[in-house]
Image: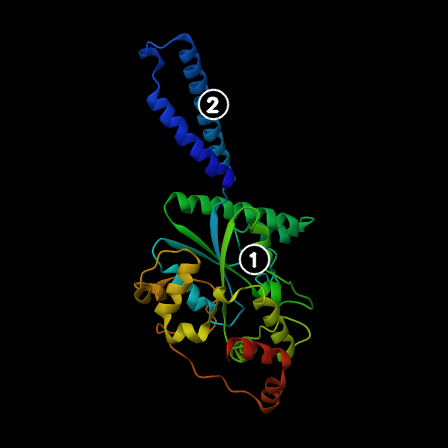
Amino acid sequence: MDDLKSMQRQLDDALKLLDNNDVSNRPDGESTNSLNHLQLNEAKSLIERCEKALEESRLNTKPTIRVIHHLACSGGTLVSKCLAALPNVFLLSELHPTSKLHMGGGKPKFLPADVITQARYANVPDIDALAWKIFVNNIKTTENHVSRLGGHLVIREHTHSDFCVGDSFEKKSSVVEHLSSEFNVLRVATLRDPIDSYLSLLSNNWEHFEPKGFAEYCKRVNTFISEYTSEQVFKYEDFVEDPKESIQKIAKVLDLPFSDSFLDTFDILKVTGDSGRSSDTISPRSRREISKDLSKEMKNERHYKILKEKFNY
């Protein structure tokens, strides 16, 4: 940056020199003419170097992409619908190239546009490496297409696949890890009280991790949310109390255009993952019933206490 500023100052001086020196129209002596020619050549050389530096800077500037993260059953679909309803925003929902949750069992599904899943069905070797290459290239192509049309691309990552599947889990977002070499990534995370999101997880039979239980879940939530600064984390409870303020703050972090008209249109957006108690009204919901045994486990869980204190639950 300092080099560019220095070159800019030199370029300003060179342009002034070009404005003030028209050698062909001045009856100066030979030495003066030689000096003027030398200065003009230096100025032209500087301009050429500046043009080259600007071109290299343009080529090295990564495009910006936005990513929103949240765990399953934490209200993420509703927040995502609201973001998708902002002006010129296009949201790709629940993306994760190495997830196999959508495949299920039994017969292969009809997915004519899904090359990654079809490659899995075909038992292509080293499929995860291929999946990441396809994913990154697809996002690059889509972002370029959307930005050329004046839009803003938002990726809703399927965070559940990183942190709540299997007997081990990631320490940070694998999607962002792969995209960051190609993009300047702006990101936010939304969080719901783990008691409520866990109860909803049980209701949907989505406890895909081992060992099962609230303690393990909270440990994974802690790992997930530790990657973000306080400015990047938005509570679902705050969102349902004042959706306009929350979406405006999220839009600011993600550098997205904001209009409160999203409140009138969010419910018509088609977004995957609508697993909760559907409604076209954004408002707090009553907590699901908790068994006595689970209530006791929740009360004494140390990982939950950390989250409760940190996020004022």
Question: What amino acid type should be assigned to the residue bearing mark 2?
Answer: Ser
Q: Percent position (x, y) of residue 216?
A: 65, 75
- Nearest to N terminus: mark 2 or mark 1: 2
Q: Tell me if I can see residue 213 in this picture.
A: no
Label number found at residue 96: 1
- In this view, 37 is above or below 58: above
Q: Residue at x 46, y 17 (%)?
A: 38
The mark lying in front, picked from 2 and 1, is 2
- Which secondary structure lies at badge 1? loop
- In this view, 52 is above or below 287: above
Q: Residue at x 37, y 70 (%)?
A: 243
Question: What amino acid type should be assigned to the residue bearing mark 1?
Answer: His
State yes or no: discs 2 and 1 in contact (Cβ < 8 Å): no
Residue of label 2 = 45
- In this view, 306 is above or below 102: below
Mark 1 nearby-residue class (10 Å; few <14, some 14–19, many ≥20): many
